[in-house]
Image (cartoon, grey):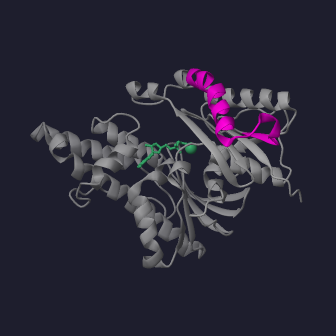
Amino acid sequence: MNSEPIYILGIESSCDDTSAAILCNEKVLSNVVANQEIHTAYGGVVPELASRAHQQNIIPVVQQAIQKANIDKNQLNAIAFTRGPGLMGSLLVGTSFAKSFAMGLDIPLIGVNHMQAHILAHFIDDENHNKPPFPFLCLTISGGHTQIVKVNDYFEMEVLGETLDDAVGEAFDKSAKILGLPYPGGPLIDKYAQLGNPKAYQFTKPRVGKLEFSFSGLKTGILRFIEKNVKENPNFIKENLHDICASIQHTIVEILLDKLKNTVKQTGIKHIAIAGGVSANSEIRKVLKESETNFGWTTYIPKFEYTTDNAAMIGISGYLAYQQNKFSDIDTVATARLKVTE
Ligand code: KG4
Ligand code: ZN
């Protein structure tokens, strides 16, 4: 095997964050993320605006990542980019940039599956983080996905359970919207929940299969509950915001933990990781940590900056693919829909 250090440029542009990272083997030298504030005013991501913002951000973000890593672009061994899933217009910006840059530098190109990358972020070298052994279970929770994945190897994954309707991130964001909070509301629910009573209000949990999720009924339940109470007291939300947020968060986290417990029971696997934007949630992080003593699990909680969309996770996936000579052709195309198993 090659003992020279391998430098990978990772590029992520699947949704509304433009990000570039440089890795030297499994170590992150830089990870630059440009968030797009523009969507806040619209209460959700507007695809056309996202694509336009990516076009503006991509060159400065890549330039900054290279500068921060203190390397020269000619040292790069390969360029990894998100090929899907995501918004087509957004993906195209990263894909086209990655292709032209790789062609210009005459280095290989590596197309990365965004959902696999969220999981593979656990293999970034970090002194405060242990890497999970195969096979392990990963609860992948983001704005677009809610899955329990059995990870047999870096690029060999099986979906054991997933949502029948909304993703858990959507459940957070839609609940926040009902409360009049701006997009994305997930982090705000987390913030207000800190000072609230999680048992103040009860919401009905969905009745679905043991490894399945469903969040659309919960969202409707929350909407009806708020409508009823606001009718009686127009200041209900304002006066009880902390308790409402804590109760919503508590219900969602309990659903997630119940499903993990079912999966552990079914598979006997007790190495449990979480990944994706919602794994930034402080309650899920706390509950998972506690499950080490409560249930004897070994848990893997990603560093905060590798939870929401970032290019470091694309970079590590690129590095792992590089080790296995998994390269993409220059005519490779972006794909809006892509399963974690593809
Ligand atoms: O992985 P991600 O950045 O993008 C997708 O690939 O979807 O996930 C974004 C989702 C959003 O729904 C956002 O509200 C949620 O992650 N999120 C959180 C928190 N931080 C981000 N949800 C709850 N608590 C948080 N602290
Ligand atoms: Zn994501």
Q: Is residue 196 visible?
A: yes
Q: Residue furthest left?
A: 232
Viewport quadrant of the N terminus: bottom right
Q: How many marks?
A: 0
Q: Nearer the viewer, residue 208 or 48?
A: 48
> Image height check: is 34 above or below 338?
above
Q: Tell me: 271 left or right of 108.
A: left
Image coordinates of residue 199 in percent, x first then y, are 24, 61
Q: Is residue 294 magenta?
A: no
Q: Is residue 56 left or right of residue 40?
A: right
> Could you tell me residue 234's position as x and y percent?
12, 36
Is residue 340 visible in the rendered structure shown here?
no
Tell me what residue is drawn at x 69 percent, y 36 percent. 66
In this orientation, which residue lies closer to the viewer: 218 or 250? 250
Tell which residue pokes out farthest to the front in this image.
70
Specify the quadrant of the image occupied by residue 31. top right
Looking at the magenta stretch, what is its main secondary structure?
Answer: helix
Q: Residue 210: x percent and y percent?
A: 49, 65
Using residue 37 as the reference point, say whether residue 28 is left or right of it. Answer: right
Q: Quadrant of residue 73?
A: top right
Determine the residue positioned at 82% across, 43% down.
77
Q: Residue at x 66, y 47 (%)?
A: 29
Does 53 sit above or below residue 32?
Answer: above
In the image, residue 137 lies at what x, y percent?
59, 65
Q: Nearer the viewer, residue 307 or 265?
A: 307
Residue numbers of the magenta segment: 51-80
264, above or below 121, in the image: below
Asked if residue 54 lies in the magenta stretch, the reply is yes
Quadrant where ligand 2 appears: top right
